[in-house]
Image (tube, coloured by chain):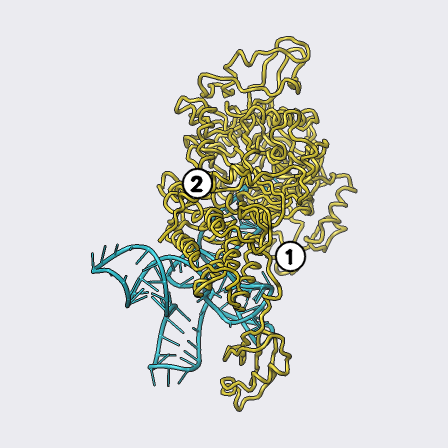
Chain colours: A yellow, B cyan
Amino acid sequence: MTYDYKEIESKWQKKWEEMDLYRAEDFSDKPKWYNLVEFPYPSGAGLHVGHVRSYTALDVVSRKLRMQGFNVLYPIGWDAFGLPTENYAIKHKIHPRIATEENIATFKRQLKSLGLSYDWSREIDTTDPEYYKWTQWIFLKFYEHGLAYKKKMPINWCLSCKVGLANEEVVEGRCERCGGPTEKREKEQWMLAITKYADRLISDLDTVDYLEKIKTQQINWIGRSEGINFTEKVKDLNIEFEVYDSIPQTFLAQTFTIIAPEHPLVKKLVEGTEYEKPVMEFVEEIKRKKAIKKFDIEKDLEGIFTGRYVENPFGTGDLPIWIASYVLADYGTGIVNCSAHDERDFAFAKKYNIPLKIVLLPEDKKQAKKVKKLDEFYREPDGLIQQPEEFKGMRWDKSREPLINYIEKKGFGKKAVNYKLRDWIFSRQHYWGEPIPIVFCEKCGTVPVPEKDLPVKLPDVENYEPTDTGESPLAKITDWVNTTCPVCGGPARRETDTMPNWAGSSWYFLRYADPKNDKAFADAEKLKYWMPVNLYNGGMEHTTLHLLYSRFWNKFLYDIGVVPTSEPYARRVSHGMVLAEDGKKMSKSLGNVINPDEVVDELGADTLRMYEMFMGPFGEAIPWSAEGTRGVKRFLDRVWKLRNRVENQESRIKNKILDSLVHKTIKKVTDDIDGFKFNTAVSALMILLNAFEKEEKISAHDYKILLLLLSPLAPHIAEELWSHLAPDPSPSQEKGGVSIFQQLWPQFNPELIKEEKINLVIQVNGKIRDTVEIEVGLVEDEVKKTALENEKVKKWIEGKEIVKVIFVKDKLVNIVIK
RNA sequence: GCCGUGGUGGUGGAAUUGGUAUACGCGACGGACUUAAAAUCCGUUGGGAGCAAUCCCAUGAGGGUUCAAGUCCCUCCCACGGCACCA
């Protein structure tokens, strides 16, 4: 026997919409709560069962919080700009706008079929001009404050597609789309100065409740290090540069300097010398190799001498300047001083016979001798500094601070901070993105589009193919490109690059607070009411991109006084992936994709929802199991069937054990939902149902509690069964409306949860020998006596010496014998 | 290589943070119902020894701390995720 989920689910979805049950009220008297899930990219593939998992989880939390009296904002929208849609449009000769609309319609239908309690009145779409108007507005604010700037940058260029690629579109040096090789090309790019916020993006993590692994990943990604900038002069040339060193303790060991092959200074160093030709050839060779594959430090140490020297930086002689494959142009200053106490430098020097100098040795004399004799690489924390003389004998790991101060005092260099984080390349040469609201005027130069002229709308084009020159497809729309300068009225050209797909998602959480506003990106009072997001769920893969970007944007907006909180998200959790049944990632090519539509059709939305909550710990990747869904379906069928055994409250027979279980279940389900332990919340409900089924009859009161606890997980069946029981007052005494979701969340009675009797565990030498039922709260002497007089225990302790007896109240007694 | 997470039955996973390991679900086996099958319901189900009461052994491997370890500490192995020439 199975219930008619199809009829029930569509019936209630319609009714809930009519009742407008899930609307979030601006400025309600109730306490506010803002739940957010990362809004989906509406791809052609439709909704993934992975979406269902995280959306259901927050839906469960939202529904429960509403029943607990919160004014909950749980919104949804579409992050719809992006390359896949553009590619789809190119392939099928269809406007990306149309493709996007179709995809959104599919996603929307699918989400609605799951009975998610979104406030649909706040739906947003990043490709809507009314939305991206404000994305452009924020860009202009960045520009106004000097945080958006243009810079010549090497970009990834796919040789076969003839298109510029974002870093994330390049996989191991190859184009993500065609698999062909890519190379770096210099191009003027818009940049956002996220590095200006690097320190605060680290330190403010202390003020938010993120999973620890998310914090560490962000900190590592930003990669802050403190060290020294040495200022150095090139001998015989009027050139000075800085060299960054994050481990300057062994600075006196430095015997050579390396400059990155791509460094602009390289040319100046060798110009007009005999080294020019071989060096420039070497540089080209390395660039080519780097473009094709990742560099392997073990095998590919390559370098060449430039013929130049750094002039005697520490009074210990000149340092030859080399070029080496392993030095990066975009970290620090792109130039490094090298010593015997860095593993790569050591290996490089050995390969090219560059003289080395040792200033760190093991404390042990024999060991020190060995290191010297065999000329081994050495850098251990317990090694002793040999030079400078003032620090001789100091442990290396303790020498950092004093030596840094020494270096500064001597005037060799200055304390400096460096980051692995780079400024954000914000230009894309694509069609399907927000136009960057800038024009270039011959007279006035770079001119921002005035706020009143926003949005700069995407023009319609015939086709979206990229151009041969690597310009955006927009460059071909001359009507659009040619415009007038907002300042002087003279002829001007529009910026043809668009924003990356991360732009719209960097502030969307603010728009939900006031999605229809056409005067501002959101009303300040509404932002003050709703922000920050109380709970934000998303994937770990966004930790160093979207999550960091959106924190940056929010902080900037906070600094210019238009958002109320410095951090956008109070708490961040992440979901685990739903894998295919074979344990692999679901993918079209492997043919192992589970389509949520089919599951909803075959088993119902409630089963799908509840199964995904039950499948395993929310944060972990779990393979899909068709068998597993059946167990949940069975459970719901049994809940359905149980309605035949429900009796009036009056005739209810007192059942202490059942009462206690009911209240324990209330506590467990409540706590587990708060703690994102949905799997054990479901199992608690199963245990309760098992107990109910053992009874001839169960009371309406108890049945209602089961339904209330079930309702966030399986809303449709709970609502349907609830409607059968109406109009009895609910156990939570809410008069309110007729919907189960207008009832109060049940509360447990602490008195009923208290155990009167417990199973005392009696151990002998830590092994369980018996359990006996005793009253709760018995004192030590009584319990010990019971234990020692226990027949089974007697057998074990007979003739043995009792060393001691451990007593844990209401839990166990452990008799230690010899 | 570095950072992070994890390793528990045939299987997805529980275990209140040091106190009855294997909850709940799936599967499997046995039974009821049925002409039969499906569905449903009832029972059994970590391994080993024993007629039984009962006992022994099991949480990736090996050590340690403790009256007591899946849980804490050390060493190692494996899997997954992230970063990866960052001087």
Residue A287 or residue A462, whichever sits in front: A462
Q: Picture quarter containing residue A665? A: bottom right
Depicted A302 relative to depicted A620: above or below: above
Q: Position of residue A463 (x, y in %)?
A: 44, 18
Q: Picture quarter containing residue A731? A: bottom right
User: Which residue carries the number 2 mark?
Assistant: A10
Mark 1 Cα shell of 10 Å, populated few (<14), some (14-19), many (≥20): many
Left-right relation of A527 to A477? right
Q: CA distance from mark 1 to mark 2?
A: 76 Å
Q: Position of residue A171 (x, y in %)?
A: 47, 36
The reply to whether residue A94 is in sight is yes
Badges 1 and 2, same chain: yes
Q: Position of residue B7 (x, y in %)?
A: 46, 59
Residue A362, numbered label: 1
Find numbered disc 2 in the image and state the secondary structure of the residue it sits on.
helix
The furthest residue to the right:
A409
Residue A502 or residue A570, whichever sits in front: A570
Q: Amino acid at mark 2?
A: Ser
